[in-house]
Image: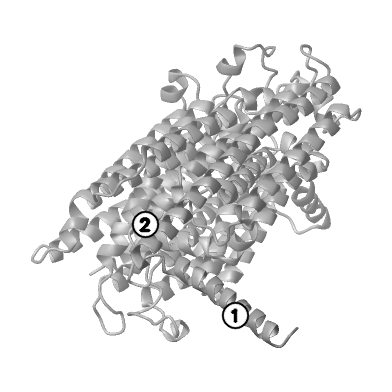
Amino acid sequence: MGISRPWQLLGLAALFLGLVAALLFSGAAAARTVSDPGALARWGLPISKALHNVSLATVIGGLIFSIGILPRTSGPRSRTHQDEAPEHPAFTRALAIAAAAGAVWTLSAIAVLVLTYSDVAGQGLSGDAEFTRALVYFMTDIDTGRAWLAVTIIGAVVTTALFGVRSLGGLALTLLLALGGLVPAALIGHSSSSSDHSGAVNSLGLHLVGVSVWVGGIIMLALLSGILTGPKPGTGADITEPTLRRFSALAGFAFALVFASGVINASIRVTNWADLFGSPYGQLILVKAAATLFLGGIGLMHRQWVIPQLGRKGAALSSRRVLWQLVLVELLVMGATSGVAVALSRSAPPEPTAFAPDATPAFILSGYELPPELTPERWLTEWRIDWLWVAVVVFALVAYVLGVAKVRRRGDKWQWFRTVNWVIGLLVLTYITSGPPTVYGMVLFSAHMVGHMALTMVAPIFLVLGAPVTLAMRALPARSDGSRGLREWVLVFVHSRFSQVVTHPLFAAANFAGSIVLFYFSDAFGFAMREHVGHELMNLHFLLTGYIFVLSMIGTDPLPRRAPYPLRLLLLLATMAFHAFFGVTVMGGTSLLAADYFGNLGRPWGPSALADQQLGGAVTWGIGEVPTLLVAIGVAIMWSRSDARETKRVDRAADRNNDADLTAYNDMFAKLAERDAKVAERNKLEGR
């Protein structure tokens, strides 16, 4: 029992009905009085965007089902003949659907690219040379055109991979690339020029991820329904219950992400209740919010009633019927909501989204006005929420707490010391990414270095002491049906060749010490200060760099290789010296780093840009040494405890075998002494 093909097409029909209704309601498709591109562009662009969004979500859903929900093979397989096991029909169909959707994604992205230029330029489609030259300029020199060109290229690469890649590792990399296709969409549109630039971009990016996972998953459930429900000839056993249970957990996360990020993004663009209830833009937001809550209620029904009933005799048939009826309703509502979302992106928000003609240099360069002059109390009071890192922190905290609760319910112990350190590390990470180090780090090099050193030296110490991988290994269940869950993926990553390289003590130390020089004395620093993507990549890189280095020094989580304690202390001393060298170099420098940025902010308070940079060098030298010294003390303590444990082990072994090793050792010397005595006696008799 599943959803038949004619019913599956209703979701696509609901998409276009919702799109047309929302466009007519908002007036977004109405003819313009000036520079009208024509009906083809006005209606073709939103339709192409709708097809693009749905096909991209289907690609992401298909990849998620393939690598984390569905079994890869039919029946058990041996470790020595994994390649001989046949693919599970659901796995094969999921990838086939994803490949077909990838082709639609690529073609629709091309259509959006061309129609977006037509819409922006205010001229109809044409095949003449002038139109082509202008289109090429749009794709190569205008941000919106470059973004859609990047999406097209990503779509083509992902589609090509889907037709040839079958290994789970390769599919996981393909999924990451497909998710990367969401980044350009988050960087353009209304969010790119909102008053809270980073907040709008990050919340929209999180929203797109959640929507793609959720919508893509529902589409895959509908299209795979006939295979999941077996048993039929050639389809294998019924995998409906585990598939739905696994997706339900993921959908719950996606729902929370979609709703929270949607509220945040809407609050940035609609700043008062009158605009929310009185403008077409605000009213479409309310429709989306109501539909999201309705879908969340259906998901709760799945989790609380349908899934538990699937495994019960007598109730299985009726519960399956309700299951696919609910999935069909979800498909219809999601289709209509997706159409409303596309129309919403074509509608003008109540707040203006263009730079003011009198924008300050600081706003042009950083996207924000200058904060007030930095004072000691403002190291606690000036905040600018980075919703991307807030989402990471909330997810990490909730997952850790749930893991600890599960371990303790099972009767196992988990040290409170680890939990406290994990929470402290997340709080420090939030302070760095959303607090004064970020606010003032955009205008003061010294404040930037405070945040940098705390991000790479302070937060990782607490996070490493939380031992998250060890907790995951204890809390996450193992799978035995040929699919890979979170536990299996963590193990694959820990034992991968990539992990062996990046966690090697010598590489970790070189990366930790060398990254700071390569970053700050190259154009990468200026890119990170000017561009939002560069800023977030900078935070991610230095957090991971510090985490891996500290993990290789004092971590208890499993690693492919650990350095002996003397080498650890030597590496720590080397990194201390390297940081000191970098700090002294910056202190004595007379050339401004990222001069086109820090030299043009127009800051009327505080020291000059060069004097502040020299202060930042002192900060690097001073702050960097203290955490490194603490890590060195931790290594020394672990070394001492290791020796104590080894001594106790030897003593226990001696107690068990009555000092057999010591007795054998003494017997060896006794035999040597006896031999020497016999040699001396023989030499004496021979008169030597």
Q: Residue furthest left?
A: 314
Q: Which mark is residue 218?
A: 2
Task: Name the kind of residue labelled 1 in the image.
Answer: Arg
Mark 2 Cα shell of 10 Å, populated few (<14), some (14-19), many (≥20): many
Colouring chosen for the image of the structure: one colour
Lateral position of residue 460 relative to residue 220, left or right: right
Q: Is residue 164 visible?
A: no
Percent coordinates x, y for residue 552 in the rendering: 59, 51
SS label for mark 1:
helix
Task: Name the kind of residue labelled 2 in the image.
Answer: Ile
In which quadrant of the rendered view does residue 444 lie?
top right
In this rendered view, identify the residue nearer to me: 67 or 611. Answer: 611
As displayed, is residue 443 above or below residue 577?
Answer: above
Can you tell which of label 2 and label 1 is closer to the viewer? Answer: 1
As displayed, is residue 275 above or below residue 192?
Answer: above
On the rendered image, what quadrant is the C terminus found in?
A: bottom right
Mark 1 Cα shell of 10 Å, populated few (<14), some (14-19), many (≥20): few
Q: Residue at x 56, y 63 (%)?
A: 174
Q: CA distance from mark 2 to mark 1?
A: 84 Å
In which quadrant of the rendered view does residue 432 lie?
top right
Percent coordinates x, y for residue 589 in the rendering: 89, 30
Q: Which residue is mark 1?
A: 675
Pointer 2 or 1: first along the chain = 2
Q: Residue furthest right?
A: 590
